Structure formats: C-alpha cells, structure tokens
Amino acid sequence: MPRIHQLPPSVITKIAAGEVIERPASVVKELLENAVDAGSTRIDVEVEQGGVELIRVVDNGCGIAAEDLPMAFASHATSKLSGADDLFRIGSLGFRGEALASIGGVAQVSLQSRPADQPSGAEIACHGGQLSEIRAWNGSTGTRIEVRHLFFNTPVRRKFLRTMGTELSHLSEIFTRLSLSYPNVHWTLRHNGKPVYEVPASATLIERIRLFFGKEISERLYEVHADAGPVRLRGYVGDPACERGNAKWQYLFVNGRCIRDRSLGHALQEAFRGLLMTGRYAVAFLFLDLPPDQVDVNVHPTKVEVRFRDGNALHHLVFTAIRERLRAENLTPRLQIPSTLAASLSYGIPNDRPLLAEPPPWSLTPDVPASPSLAFMPTAPASHPRPFSVQPPEMSVNPTGNGAKANGAAAHPVIPSVSSFKAIQLYDTYLVLETHAGMLVIDQHALHERILFEGLKERIRSGPLETQKLLIPEPVDLSDEEAARTLEHRDALASLGLEISDFGGGTVLLSSYPALLSRRPPQAVLRAVVDHLVNQDRPPTREALLNDLLSLMACHAAVRAGDPLTREEIASLVEQRNLADDTHHCPHGRPTALLFSKQDLEKQFRRV
C-alpha cells in the first residue's frame, strides 16, 4: 500500500479545474459572471475555433487593482465574501474564488485591468498555474482577459472536446442565458472574426427572445407576473403550440442566475397539464426574485442547482400564476398553410398534378378568434350511428349566459340553439362548423373526451363516482413497490370508484371500480392506474392523480373516431362545447378544434 502524501499544487489545480471547467463554455460562463458582478454595462466576447484556441472577454466594469492581480489567480480568493455567514445570503453570480485559478491551471491566460479611479492599469499572465510579474498597462477602464489554448497541458481532457460547431453551440447557450437575465448590459459575441450576436442594452426581453429563438416563439408568448410577499415572478410562457420534445427551452432564473430545479420544472409542466401530450414540454422564460437568504446557491460546483428555504411555496406560486394565465387565453389553434403550399396555390399547379392529392402538412399557430355567430344546416342522418350519449355527467352551466368565465377571462363563444348553426361530419371523425371567424374543424373524440372529463370533475366535487361492485373481490398481483404505491393512494382511488385493500405479499384486492368503465375488465382498469403511479418521477398530488385517472376514464367513455353521429348528436356535442372549461385541448393535450380563418380562405381564393 503506497504511503499517504500531499499532491503537488499543479495536480491539485488540475483536479479543481475538472470540477469547474469542462469545456470552453465553462470558461465563458465564469468570465461573464465575473464581468456582470463587476457592474459592467458593456461586455464583448470574442472566440476562435469554438473557444478552444481563444476566448477574449472585455468589459467596462470596476476593474481590479494592480496589487490584487496575483490574488485573482489564487485558489479560494474572492472579493465577494467576507465571512461564512455570507454564504447564506449570496447576492452575486460568482463567489467561490476558484474560477480564475482553475482556468489559469489548464490554459494560457492574460489579465489586464484598470479601476476607474486609477490613471493607468496593470497586467499579469498565468500559464498553467505559473504567474508572471505585474506590468503596467495603458488600457481603458474595466477588465480584458484572454484565455488561449485551453487544456494545452492536459491533452487527455482536450481529446474529449467535441467539434467546433458543438463547442460554439454550448458557448452560445451560456451567452444567451446571461443576455436574457441582464437586460441593462450591451452584449456582443464574435466567432472567428465574424459577428454572431449583438444585443443592445435598450433591447426588451421580448426582443431578446426574438433574437435568440425566432419570431415563431416570440409572437406566441403570454406574459406572466405574480407576487407573494417578497417573492416576485415575471416572464413569459409559450402557447401550447410551441411545445418541444425536451425541456431545453425552459429557462428558469433565480436572482439573475440560470438554474435547473426539478420542483419548479414540475410546477411548470403541471400548469400545462391537459394542454400538452405526454413527452412534450412547454416553452418558458421565467424569472424569480427573492431575498438572498431564502435560497442556497452553494450546493453545486457550477452553481446550476440551488436549494430553496420554502420550495413548496415557490412551486405553488409558479403553478398558480401560469395556470391562471393560460386560463385567461383562448388557446384554440388555427390552421396555417405552409409557405411552399401557399406559393403553389398562388402561382398555379400543373394540370397533370392532382390538387391536394395528399393532405398538406398543416402547422399550428395560436389564434384569438372573434366571437362567432353560428347558423344551422341539418346534416343527413348517419346510416348506422353507434348509440351513445353525448350528455356528460351533471356539470354547472355558466350562469352569465354570455360566454364569459366567472373570473372575467374570455371563454369559448356561446353557441346558440340547435336550430341556428351549420355543422357537418367528415370521415365519421371530424365536425366542420361555419363561424364568422372562419371554418372550425372539431375532433369529435377529443372534444367529447374533454366534455366528459369536465363533467366528471364537477361530479366528483360532490362525492364519489358511481361504482360497479364485484360479487367476489378480485386479487391483483403486483410487485411490492407497485402495491405500496397503490395502497398509499387508496383514499383518492376510492373517490373514483376504485376500492382496494391489502391482501399481503404484493397482492391487492379490488372490490369495485367505476361504473363508467364497466365495459373494461376490472384488472385492466387497476393496472392502468398502477402503471401511472409507478412511472411518476415524484409522488403525484391528489389533484394530479385524480386528473390523470379522470382523463383515462373520459378517454375510454368518449365517442371514438370513426363513429358516425346523427345530427342531434352533432348538435348536442357542439352546444356543450360552451359548458366545459379549456375545451381547446383534450385532457391529454391534443387540440379539440382547429380554426381555418376566413381571411386565410379569402387569401387562397384571391378575394383579398
């Protein structure tokens, strides 16, 4: 067994650098945070070869005194802390005092700086941890730092870097986050001598979002703001039509610091419940400001994870603010003809080419339709309609009778009586309505599913749902984990008509299940519930569990695609669209209707 010995300083520096400096983007993050903390109003970033060969950051901040330059590269040396108590009220972005020491240990660094109250500045170099002498420097106020040949003395680490384009994308992401978070700073980014971004200090947050994420996103955002005591929430959330396949476009900032937090991410996704399909994620740019002593940022070397003193209160604030904001919008999507198809329609289609031989690849954009007045044209009765009841369980009807929600937000336009609207069924799946706003195409299953879901929610508020009792309780064999998770929520399940008890050894006894799902085998109903519970990252709240199970019940009880409907059934389904909340999406997040505006129709037929 080798003897215990002290590691040499050069090795210690490289180990420390490995915790903080992973790639060029890590260097840019540390340098930009220092520039922000220095009170800069302009920060210029220039990189070469994705930042591997050169990273230059120039700011006009407070600068560093000449005698303090060597200390800037010392380990755990900082101007941002004075004692241990300061760790629990961090008001700056950088505070550990490791950044420059780590960077200087694995690169060739040149640091030049001049405080505003000094007639001249000074410079120092640090190559692989070795410091040079301090020399005079006649530059402008602020700090200029160059990092060359990153990982020149650790070739193994350098081999793990990706292509220039990949490294530049990571670096640009860091630049984007800070540009969004600090709007009073003029930011520039250049790569290999060419400008990439320039963000003036006068640019608003929306203008910055448009610059980094495009017009498609910036024009589909809803402003969010809420206060809870000293805590302030502001920012934007994207329309459900902006949804993405991952959470990368969810930007969460706490006191100016971009963070990852599972609890806040969960609150955001829960606020979009029923508006997004499983596996899809909302777009959001949210900023939380709270007292520094309410958050601990000293839990991760790169400071991307934090710990809140009252995480539950923040979760509730984010969830409630976003949910109420979305409820205030009519989120019915509209159909938009892609530019390629629009061009072909505008300039004509060859005679030998069939017109719309295949359905066009429609894209979705949000719309706030005008209040339509619908007229009725009876449709021909379906030849063999499947008997079903469109009428949901009892639900409260809006007492105002004018389409306005109780909280004052705009609701779906009131549809008059059955004798006053036009509607037809296509492919035994879609209902087409004429409105003053345009042509509304409804997915009959998605709409009926939402109506049933809202009706079941209303019913469950007054007591448990109707149940189907089993003459002999059915044993259902589960794993120990599945059984424990399921029995933990037995009270919530009982309110839905699922009565279970522990039989021991991972087996539960099912004695009743919802009457609405009497056509499904009882075990299948319970197993669907168990699968949902086990697949959750965190134990669901009672409300979330009820929503999920009610959506499952509504889905299996609703009319299906391919079911022909009579004109009375069509009329009843359309009329009830007013009575349910959020009928623009089914409980699983699919749109229930799409609007092809009258203006779009007139454009395609060259009437305007």
Image (spheres, grey):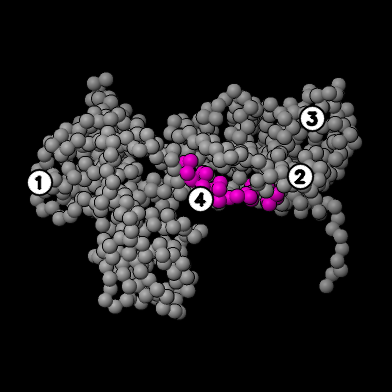
Secondary structure of residue under mark 2: helix
Tag 4: amino acid: His
Q: CA distance from mark 4 to mark 3?
A: 41 Å
Question: Residues in magenta?
Answer: 297-322
**Against 206, is 460 above or below?**
below
Residue 490, percent from left and from top: 41, 67
Is residue 365 in view from this perspective?
A: no
Visible residue check, residue 384? yes
Separation of marks 2 and 1 at Cα, in angstroms? 76 Å
Numbered circle sitting on residue 266: 4
User: Mark 2 or mark 3, which is nearer the start of the sequence?
Assistant: 3
Q: Amino acid at mark 3?
A: Gly
Q: Secondary structure at mark 3?
A: loop
Residues at marks 1 and 4, CA–CA distance in whole angstroms? 47 Å
Tell which of 380 and 120 is nearer to you: 380
Q: Which residue corresponds to mark 3?
A: 63
Spatial separation of the CA atoms under disc 3 and disc 2? 22 Å
Indicate the quadrant where residue 203 lies.
top right
Disc number placed over residue 381 in the picture, else none: 1
Query: Is 299 part of what is drawn in magenta?
Result: yes
Q: Residue at x 86, y 60 (%)?
A: 6
Q: Secondary structure at mark 4?
A: helix
Q: Answer yes or no: do the residues labelled 1 and 3 have beta carbons within 8 Å? A: no
**Above or below 402: residue 279:** below
